[in-house]
Image (cartoon, grey):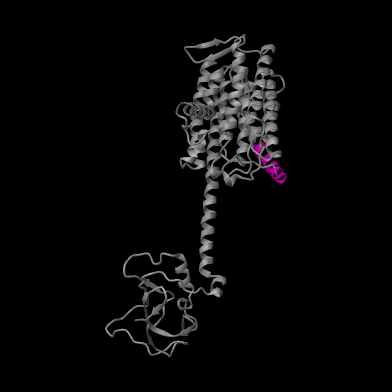
Amino acid sequence: MSSAIPHFVRLGFEKPRRFFSSPTATRSLISSPVFRFGPPRSGGFKFGLGRCSLKRFSVPMATFDENSLVVSTVIEESNGICGGMSSSMPSPSDGEDRDTELLVYPSVDVDLPINKDRVEAPDPSLAVTGHHVATLQQGRKRRRIQTGILINMGLIAFSAVFLLFFDWCSWRIIRQPLKPFLLMHPFTLSAFLSAFAGYLYVPIVDGMKIHQILRKEGPTTHSSKRGTPTMGGLFFIPIGVFVARVIAGGNSIQLDGAAVATFAFAIIGLLDDLLSCIKSHNYGLPGWVKLSLQVAVGTWFSFWLDSSSISTPYNMKWLVPLPPPFGLVCLGKFYLILTAFCFAAMGNGVNLTDGLDGLAGGSAALAFVAMSVTVLAICPELAVFGASMAGACIGFLFHNGYKASIFMGDTGSLALGGALAAMAACTGMFFPLFIASGIFVMEVLSVIIQVLSVKITKRLYGTSRRVFRMAPVHHHFELCGLKEPIIVASAYVISYILAMLAGYIGLISA
């Protein structure tokens, strides 16, 4: 057997069992001076309060009771006596060669006195453990950030390929000469400007303490989002409108009307956000006031459409293009009612979807991409507007992707809904809009179903019953155990499919 003393002591147990039932007892035992083990220094092994040089030693421990600790040691000495320990100790049997080990036979827990100096002194093992835990936490955070970036890169890649494809073959589809990169140019420029503006805007809003105030009835997992700046719509919505105005020129009445409607909805959202921040609660404008203002803007837009001289390929108003075999359907004055309803529905749809990092912004970007392709044959200027707004949403996602450094607030969500509704109202493409905005429609329907379920069951059975654990439906998926990036990525995949379907239906309808 080697005379070298190993730097560790193996613990041997008679059978697999829990060492101690109480963490306090375990900590007390380890803190006791008897069990201070360490690597040998100057040729000796530190044991207890003394030092000794050993070739072989075995420390079998006797049973514990509540009032005493009996330790029976067997040590064979080679170079002298351990400091503070007697040398008259029985030796192990001659026929056995034991490796260095510690045999522990626990029976019950025992609380030993804690050495205060030992507790207060920094423990190297605890420091190493804490370092490993911190490293693991940083690794998880890094993986989460990479997940958000990966989702955004997939969204950007799909949108860019989608627009490039239609830029390449659009003249074959609509039989009109168009500028090269008609859709890709505003998309790229808006995305770059919005991403750059966010790096300037986010620190300013954060310094002004304009933070999102979370609802008490929301998911508990959103507590980490507390203190995140809001009102991000103030920096990317104007960029999307401005870029479209510059590239498309100033000769489009439809583009002017869509821009005014977008800013009108943005002002409603801004009032709601300001009241939320000033009063330090998350209610803002009362629900009926917000809805009334949205309906008022939609009604004004309807009358503006009725009074303005908007040129269409069909030489008449109030037509809704539908895919074959339906063709063109004239709605008459019902077109005005549908327009007001569309404004209110889309504004609230995007607003309700804005509950997870990147969910509303990414879904809106894909809806704008689909609508820009859909309206290309009817009004190319509105197609430029849709591509520019899609790029603005992509630039915003550089700061709103998981985990978000800023929220768009009602300023951004209502403005996006108003812009989508204006594009459909100016061209009659309501059917492709509802397909491309399938995520928003699903969110609104989930809230309607939840409210009706609670009211009907309470009236019938006396107790309210819910269809979803929480509405809107993305919170239901959260409470079912799905992670936030998984929900957002799944919504993007659904939006990809709906965007392609809406673009195809819009082209064959026009």
Residue drawn at (45%, 85%), measured in percent from left and top? Answer: 52
> x and y percent of residue 361 in the render?
59, 34
Lateral position of residue 464 relative to residue 393, left or right: left
Residue that extends furthest to the front in the rendered view of this protein: 462
Residue that extends furthest to the left in the rendered view of this protein: 95
Question: In this view of the protein, which residue sits in the foreground, 423 or 174?
Answer: 423
Q: Which residues are magenta?
A: 192-209
Q: Quadrant where the N terminus lies?
A: bottom left
> x and y percent of residue 508 in the render?
51, 17
Whether 193 is among the magenta residues is: yes
Q: Please determine whether, in this image, residue 97 is positioned above or below residue 434.
A: below
> x and y percent of residue 498 in the render?
50, 27
Q: Quadrant of residue 370?
A: top right
Question: In this view of the protein, which residue sits in the foreground, 432 or 213?
Answer: 213
Residue 488 appears in the rendering: yes
Question: In this view of the protein, which residue sits in the foreground, 470 or 435?
Answer: 470
Q: Quadrant of residue 98?
A: bottom left
Question: In this view of the protein, which residue sits in the foreground, 226 or 70?
Answer: 70
Q: Main secondary structure of the magenta part?
A: helix
Q: Please determine whether, in this image, residue 192 is positioned above or below residue 62.
A: above
Q: Please determine whether, in this image, residue 87 is positioned above or below residue 457.
A: below
How many numbered circles are shown? 0
Lateral position of residue 162 relative to residue 419, left or right: left
> x and y percent of residue 15 in the render?
31, 67
Lateral position of residue 499 relative to residue 277, left or right: left
Residue 188 appears in the rendering: no
Whether 208 is among the magenta residues is: yes
Q: Quadrant where the C terminus lies?
A: top right
